[in-house]
Image (cartoon, rainbow, N blue to C red):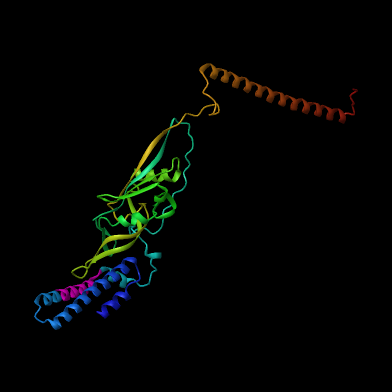
Amino acid sequence: MQEYREQAILHRPLTDAAKSLSRWFERELETIHRTIAFGREHLASHPDDRETRESVQQLEQERAALYRGWENSSVRRAVEACGEKKTAAPGGIEQRVGLAVESRSHLPPEIRADTGTAATLIAKRFSGHAAVFNRWADLGYFKEKIAPGAFAEALKRSDVRFLFNHDANFIFGRSSASTLELREDSVGLAFTCYLLAFDGPSYQLARRIDRKDVSGCSFSFTVKRDEWKFPATPGGIDERTIVEIGGLFDVGPVTYPAYPQTDVIATFEKVERPARASVPRSAPIPTAQGRAVLRDRAFYEELDRLDERIARQRRRQVSYQYGEAARILDRMNVHLLC
């Protein structure tokens, strides 16, 4: 048993999943070992206790199966295949993003200007499921599913943000601000995020969700309790069941969701706005007669501006002509008598 425990500790560090697997392996092994020890101690003084003897034999078979499972573990093989040690996420936080994600996407700002139209379309809210229950996700070297009720306790104590691609630069809601609502339903972890009106990044992300460029979600979390199942034969893949989430940090849409069964939709709203007017918005809308007066006034004001422009041009022309005549007479030594 000590050999397998040392091996489990040796191959712990690379990923949070590997850490979880090794801890679970140690706990299961320790529990079985202690139970077998208690059973053998009892049989030493009660050798005729057939039921205890059968239980001990069954536990020894389970321990042998656990050893074989550890040898067949796909997580252990992946850890051993890694040539260099990688640092785990701070605090053991896991993010359920697909394996293709290497960098975070950024949304450039988009200006929502008044175009003079009578209505403007705004993004109202996002809704969907950030996680789903009892559905397998292929995480590369192990499979994972979430048990119903896994988020129940975490939702009571977590202040969750709604982010895009887990990027804190793009926050659209927060549970403590009542702009993000989270709840468990029969499908999984459901959310509703209420958006800012006339917000460029919100509108841009909503349009991408609406045309299905972005269709899935992710969540960032720590695990309080999980269970593993080793493959029965070499070359198989480990199976992990998350029973209870320790802490929930953020949810939201991502470009590459690890759980493709998650979903997100965007809801839009048409906001009626008055068309652009030629008078200040604080002034009352003029009647037809008033509009005619305003048009006439603008017409005559434009004529006055044209008259002033012509007068300035004529003054410049006269001044130029007089100066040129004076220079010609001076060259001819002719002086005007004033």
Does 35 sit left or right of 86 as displayed?
A: left
**244 part of magenta stretch:** no
Q: Is residue 69 visible?
A: yes
Relative to 136, does residue 214 appear above or below in the rendering? Answer: above
**Which residue shows up at 73% across the image and 24% down it?**
314
Q: Quadrant of residue 35?
A: bottom left
The quadrant in which the N terminus is found is bottom left
Q: Position of residue 283 (x, y in %)?
A: 55, 26
Q: Nearer the viewer, residue 268 or 185?
A: 185
**59 part of magenta stretch:** yes
Question: Mainly helix, strand or loop, the magenta region?
Answer: helix
Q: Quadrant of residue 65?
A: bottom left
Residue farthest to the top, as pictured: 289
Does 305 sit left or right of 321 as displayed?
A: left
Q: Is residue 89 visible?
A: no
**Which residue shows up at 53% across the image and 16% down it?**
289
Q: Nearer the viewer, residue 83 or 120?
A: 120
Relative to 146, does residue 315 appear above or below in the rendering? Answer: above
Magenta region, residue range: 58-73
